[in-house]
Image: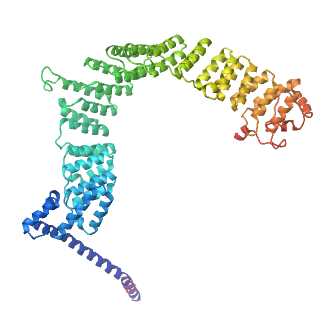
Amino acid sequence: MNSSIQVFDSVQEVFGEVYQEVFALLFFSCAFVFFKYNSLRVVPKVQKHLSHVGFNAATANNASPATSNSKNVNAGGGNSQPPVGHKRIQDAEEKIMTLLQNREFTAALNAYRTFEREGLDRLFVNEAMYAAFIESAVRVGKLDVVDRMLHTMIRNSINLSLNSWHSILKMLSSRKHYSACIEVFVTYGHILPNDKVIFSCLINAALEGGAHEHALSMLSRYRECDLDVSDYVTAFRAFVATGSAKLAEKLYMEIGANSSPLMLNLVLLAWINDKQPEHAMNLLSKAHEFEASADHAEPGTSAKLVDTISYNTVIKGFVASGDMESCFQCLQSMMSHNLEPDDVTLTSLLEISLADLSGGMTERLIQMLVQSGEERPLDAATANLFIKLLIRAERLPKAVQVYDALRSSRGSPTIVTYSMLVKALVDSLDMERALLIVQDMVSAGVAPDEIVFTHLLEGARLVGNHKLGETLFKDMLQSGVRPSEYTLTMMVKLHGRHGAHETALKLVETWEDKHGMKPSVIHYTCLMSGCLRNKAYEHAWAAYKLMEKHAVCPDEVVMSTLLPAMVACKAFDRVLHLAHRALRQPGGVRVSKATLNSALSQMLLAPAAAQQASEMRLLMQTARIDVVTSSRGALGKAEQASSRVAPGRVEQSSCSRGAPGKAEPAPWRKRA
């Protein structure tokens, strides 16, 4: 009994706490329903009153304020005036239209929101105002306003005219608001008229926006429009984008002989994208049957449904699949139907024919290119592509044959054509033919540039013709061609190969003054390497001193090249100089431990270099480099000599900064 009383008290307490909230919710719900019902009743009453005084949607759309007022005056007598609500709505619409016409979109939107708060937006029936609002919103990128206006029009039972839909969707498409176009179709597709312009814009927007599933659903509505045969191109493009090759072919077969080459090419592309070139080839045969059909054209006339692009599309499909034989079968079919292969055809076939090691197919293609050059001038870009691929495939004679065909067909080789051939001929050591190409170049009025001259200088070096190289360099300067750093490299190598070390040294020394470019460490390395190759150690050291004079920092390659050479000629004072430069703190140059230890070992073996050996050893120890020599006896003699060396000798060198043992580690050790 007590438990029942407790439960009852608990329930009563809970109810007492929540009944006020429940009552408040019920009150507000009833109030919302009441005001909603009254607001819905206001619109019909006002519209009924406006229609009674002669105002309707057509009047708002078509009649000017002056005309509307005059009609009302005639209807109600000379002293009658339009109602206040009617005039206020007209004034509001006129204000918004004026702001939109003056490109004051923000002000127009604020005005609309003001009227919206007063409930007047439910009475706006001017279709031109909504269209102008939507177009302005698209222009400024306010797509939320576009959706808002369309929603308001649907609520107010206003339908946009066909021209307005055209204008809105064209603007959305042209400004690449593809998602907005798709949203229009998804939300308002049920009220869109079946018009080919409207759905053409929507389909293209869906394809560009990647919404392929919507594009297919739009196609069903698009085909319900009043379409001409040419309008089906949009459908074929949609099928290609969505990978619907079967649907594309089905539509093409329905159109049949009334189709166009563009439609056929799109269907072929759909099959090629689906990696079925055989099916595309079969469709080509059917298209030729349509061409030959008696009901397609009048007797004695012909209409082409298949063009060169059609065969190029199929050939590219066979090239992608690596089917060389089918490529040439397609080519034979093309020529049997009196279609001439163009540059795209030949270049596509060339890529796959290069895989034929026998060269038979490549020869056929070149012959076709030469024959086409007899009928019309060859395209330089096509010839350049042939030459480039043939050179890459190491078929230089065929590349020269294409070049000759280009010239004989009254074509115009470009600087790229000449440069590729000169480089390839130089690499094959055919300098005579390379010089003939340059003569053709000059005769054609094309001035050789720095790249062509550099290739020729490299060729003169490779064939060992020093005199020819000097002549070419002089011709280059006389023709006004500014040499580059690569030109200097070629000239240094050319002089170095023929032992003209003084000439090379002089060239590098005066290069900056004559040509405005400072030689780099690479040029000095080439200069020293050429001298050392002929064991011209004095010239090599002169090159290094010139590099120091011009404040060019040596690198690891210089040290690894020059230091062992100075050890070999027993110029140990120069070895010590290089070691000081390498181990300088800061700004040293990385050099291997083995190179330094090898130099120290050679110093220890030379009795006259005891002092240099001691300095070298102390220098290495200061830089924290482990001293490892091949002669313990020589090392002992060096230790005795080191005791006679003045303690400040090494400290005064450029590599020592303070007391021995406290110097900073070498730069290469820091990097390690």
Q: Nearer the viewer, residue 283 or 92?
A: 92
Residue at (34%, 52%) from the top-left corner? 141
Q: Magenta span has 131?
A: no
Q: Nearer the viewer, residue 303 or 25?
A: 303
Coloration mode: rainbow
Residue 319 locus on image (x, y percent): 37, 25
Left or right side of 432 for 151: left
642 vs 18: above or below: above
Q: Which of 671 and 74 is in front in this view?
A: 74
Left or right side of 383 for 80: left
**Quadrant containing the N terminus in the rendered view:** bottom left
Q: Within the image, what quadrant is residue 575 found in?
A: top right
Q: Magenta span has 11?
A: yes
**Quadrant containing the C terminus in the rendered view:** top right
Q: Which SS type dominates the magenta stretch?
A: helix
Residue at (18%, 33%) from the top-left corner? 255
Q: Within the image, what quadrant is residue 307 found in?
A: top left
608 vs 433: above or below: below
Residue 595 locus on image (x, y percent): 76, 29
Q: Within the image, what quadrant is residue 541 found in?
A: top right
Residue at the outermost top position: 432
Residue 415 locus on image (x, y percent): 46, 21
Left or right side of 78 for 544: right
The span shown in magenta is 8-14
The answer to whether residue 151 shows anywhere in this view is no
187 vs 44: above or below: above
Residue 326 locus on image (x, y percent): 33, 22
